[in-house]
Amino acid sequence: MTAEKPFFTPEEHAELLSLFRTLRQADADLFARKNYRLLRDRIEQSARGCTLSRDTFGLNPVITSLQTAILAASEIGMRGDALTACLVQPSLPPDADLAPVGETFGQGVATVLHGLRRVSQLYAKTPSIQSDNFRNLLVSFAEDMRVVLLIIASRVNLMRHIKNNPNQEAVRSAATEASYLYAPLAHKLGLYQLKSELEDLSLKYLEHDAYYMIKDKLNATKATRDAYIERFIAPIQDMLTHAGLRFHIKGRTKSIHSIWQKMKKQHCPFEGVYDLFAIRIIIDAPREKEKQQCWQAYSLITDRYQPNPKRLRDWLSIPKSNGYESLHITVLGPENKWVEVQIRTERMDEIAEHGLAAHWRYKGVRAGDSSVDEWLANIRSALETGDDLQLMDQFKTGLTEDEVYVFTPKGDLLKFPKGATVLDFAYHIHTNVGNRCVGGRINGRNVPMRQALVSGDTIEVLTSNTQHPKLEWTKYVATGRAKAKIRQSVKEEQAKEGLMARELLERKLKNRKIEWDESAISALVRKTGFKEASEFYKALAEERLSINELIDTYVELYRHENNLLERQAARSAEEFTFEANGQHKAQGDDDVLVIDQNLKGIDFQLARCCRPVYGDDIFGFVTVNGGIKIHRTNCPNAQALRERFGYRIVKARWAGKGSSQYAITLHVVGHDDLGIVNNITSIISKEANVSLRSISIDSNDGLFSGILTVMVDDTRVLTALIKKLRTVKGVKAVTRS
């Protein structure tokens, strides 16, 4: 049987002992006799039991944890439970109970391990890390500030040890995360050295050639650059001292990453970057004299060195939105080299260095600031103001969740305000998803639509095609976006139902051979107690109105409207006898009814189904009441009347000239272009013998459908009008009812 290969190589075993000694020097208390024995035994048991496994890069987790602990202790100042948790973590299975760990090493260690585990679970969701949302969610998941500091230290350590790793895809992935997530996070915490290191190492792995080009050129010019800085600041120190200003001067060289960003932004070579280094002059001035002394320093420096006015940045008069105040100038120094000089006071420098934390001390906390940023800035302040870092072991975030961050099933990360529900999530995805939402599934568990969201949850929306939005849903959402979409969708649903109700009424009237008349419908709406037609149709759609009763009422109103167009009442048609007058009958056609405006003794009406106009071919139809309805020969009802009631048909024709106006309904269809309605009404208004009685326009999917009622004298005028309307740009068809 082959002997099992040991987990630690001889080289790793030697490195392990060396790292233990280094860490002991950084935190002697960590290696008190009891703790040292517990940690050593735990690591040995894990190695013998083969519960340890190497990471994606093939690195030994115990070695990595020791390196991370040393970095956290020496460069961040962490102590105690945080370092112990860092060392214990590799030996813990992902689902291990943390209670025994708390009993052995203390509850503080268990708390940090719990935060590290939650962060690990967050990564298991494989989200996009290139967003502020993920940064905030990561901080929220960590729960304890020590966890955030440890994961930054862990990432810096990882970036230091993957230089020649063969898994280049994993290297690039780690470098991308360091650039987009951990470097900005370190910057917010004031860990500027680690931030610059993360950015430089990311550039090294992602853009190898650019990194080494800049590095080689910086190394080649370092001695010369340092000597130049000394020559540049010497006369400035003398001038400021003689002016009676209290100050100190710092010189700094830009990081490789910063130089590369400047080269890309300005599209210039390395030699074209003006500010490879900058001089920072920090003046110790009372608050009331800050601006005065800064501009005094500016005057002295520009007297000595020629300034470039195009590169003056005055953040003294108008500070940046984050509170940053400083005066940046670029001057031509010795050897005709451009040098950036930053002039600020001690107070301004503290705000620039400490960020939000220092700004609060001077300006006060502003309402509405992100709680995550506040929490991070407090840590940053603690790090830089020299507080006893051992107190970190007992310090908790106190983070109040004003926002929640949740995942879609595909791993996308979304942000919502506290109190947002599954319905908010559904409407954020799409309006149709929200309108059809019946509930959700959170982490695989079915929940109602009003279920509140919790950071880190994975949300799936459950929908049904039979679901429709309701106005009461606005009580179940917290976002203005969802409320607006619910109201809009409910309004659209009501409009759709109203249209269906209108179509129902039209169909019922048509089935009973009753004509549709807009004026009678308007009277019906008013008579039923509604101010708006939309409210009337909504009530009809909800069956709050009886369709049959409405039709009966409509018939009465229709007859009333119709009577307004009746000619003078006279004898019944049955009593009528034709006069032997050449004006009222055609030669050789004595049985033809001749229609004239001055016709007396005949009760006749123009049929509203076809609305005949002087000049149309017509016929008469004797009604059951004895009157005569005049129809066009091409009336939609003509064939049925002839087939069923041929004995009531009377020949008819017009006599004389058209001397009155007739109401005609035109249907216009076209593209819903801007101004098309104005063009149509303009043509009608210009016609001498035409007047517009009513107009109704509906628009849908870029097309419009219009119903126009116009008054015309005869068919000649009507035909001319239709031809002109068809010439309007965008009009596709004009037809007469």
Image (cartoon, rainbow, N blue to C red):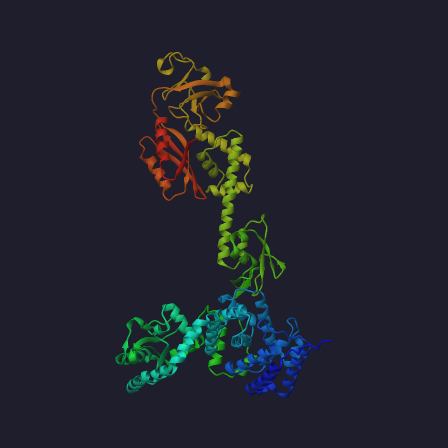
Q: Is residue 58 left or right of residue 311?
A: right
Residue 263: image location, x then y, percent: 38, 70
Single out the residue that lies furthest toward the left. Answer: 303
In the rendered image, residue 446, in percent from the top left (x then y), is placed at 63, 58
**Viewer-side residue, 101 vs 561:** 101
Residue 312 placed where, x, y %? Answer: 31, 73
Residue located 49% across and 43% down the image = 535
Q: Percent from the top left, x then y, of residue 138?
A: 54, 69
* Residue 272 appears in the picture as rendered: yes
Q: Nearer the viewer, residue 253 or 327?
A: 253
Residue at (60% x, 77% y) in the render: 60
Question: Would you say residue 714 is visible in this rendering?
Answer: no
In this rendering, the answer to whether 303 lies above or below 469 is: below
Which quadrant of the figure contains the N terminus? bottom right
Which image quadrant for residue 357? Answer: bottom left
Residue 195 or residue 491, whichever sits in front: 195
Q: Residue at x 34, y 31 (%)?
A: 690
Q: Quadrant of the C terminus?
A: top left
User: What is the tally of numbered marks visible in this picture?
Assistant: 0
Rendered view: 715 above or below 572? below
Name the image quarter holding residue 126: bottom right
Q: Name the residue nearer the viewer: 596 or 34.
A: 34
Task: Work out which residue is located at the far front of the displayed protein and give it.
Answer: 2
